[in-house]
Image (cartoon, grey):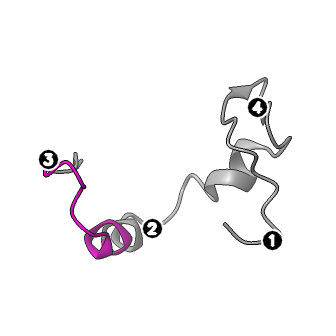
Amino acid sequence: MGDDNPCIGVCEIQDGYCIGCGRSADEIFGETDSDPVGSDAVTESLPPAADGQARATD
């Protein structure tokens, strides 16, 4: 996490805002209607899970 990230590790959304950092879900997760092709590219670039289990896909 960068110095500009207000995350304190308490990630729970209530009434549309995180109770830990106060950001909205859109601020934390970005646009919810993003290009699925772009999302797939990001997912494919991630390393395998540490426990060896496959990641879920759509």
Q: Mark 3 points at which residue?
A: 53
Is the residue marked by circle 1 packed among few (<14), some (14-19), or many (20+) residues within 10 Å? few
Q: Which of marks 2 and 1 is in front?
A: 1
Q: Is residue 42 magenta?
A: yes
Q: Is residue 32 magenta?
A: no
- Quarter of the N terminus within the rendering: bottom right
Could you tell which of marks 3 and 2 lies nearer the N-terminus?
A: 2
- Look at label 4 and name its amino acid: Gly
Q: Mark 1 points at which residue?
A: 3
Q: Residue 35 carries which label?
A: 2
Q: Which residue is drawn at 38% across and 63% down?
A: 36
Could you tell which of marks 2 and 4 lies nearer the N-terminus?
A: 4
Q: Residue at x 79, y 23 (%)?
A: 15
- Look at label 3 and name its amino acid: Gln
Q: Is residue 17 left or right of residue 1?
A: right
Q: Is residue 42 left or right of residue 12?
A: left
Q: Which residue is drawn at 21% across and 63% down?
A: 48
Could you tell which of marks 2 and 1 lies nearer the N-terminus?
A: 1
Is the residue marked by circle 2 packed among few (<14), some (14-19), or many (20+) residues within 10 Å? few
Q: Nearer the viewer, mark 3 or mark 2?
A: 3
Q: How far apart are marks 4 and 1 (CA)?
A: 24 Å
Q: Quadrant of residue 12?
A: top right
Asked if residue 11 is positioned above or below residue 40 in the image, the reply reads above
Q: In the structure shown, which secondary structural element does the residue marked by tag 2 occupy?
A: loop
Magenta stretch, residue numbers? 41-53
Q: How far apart are marks 3 and 1 (CA)?
A: 32 Å
Q: Distance between the residues labelled 2 and 1?
A: 28 Å
Residue 23 x, y percent position in the rendering: 82, 46
Q: In the structure shown, which secondary structural element does the residue marked by tag 3 occupy?
A: loop
Chief secondary structure of the magenta portion: loop
Q: Are marks 3 and 1 in contact (CB under 8 Å)?
A: no
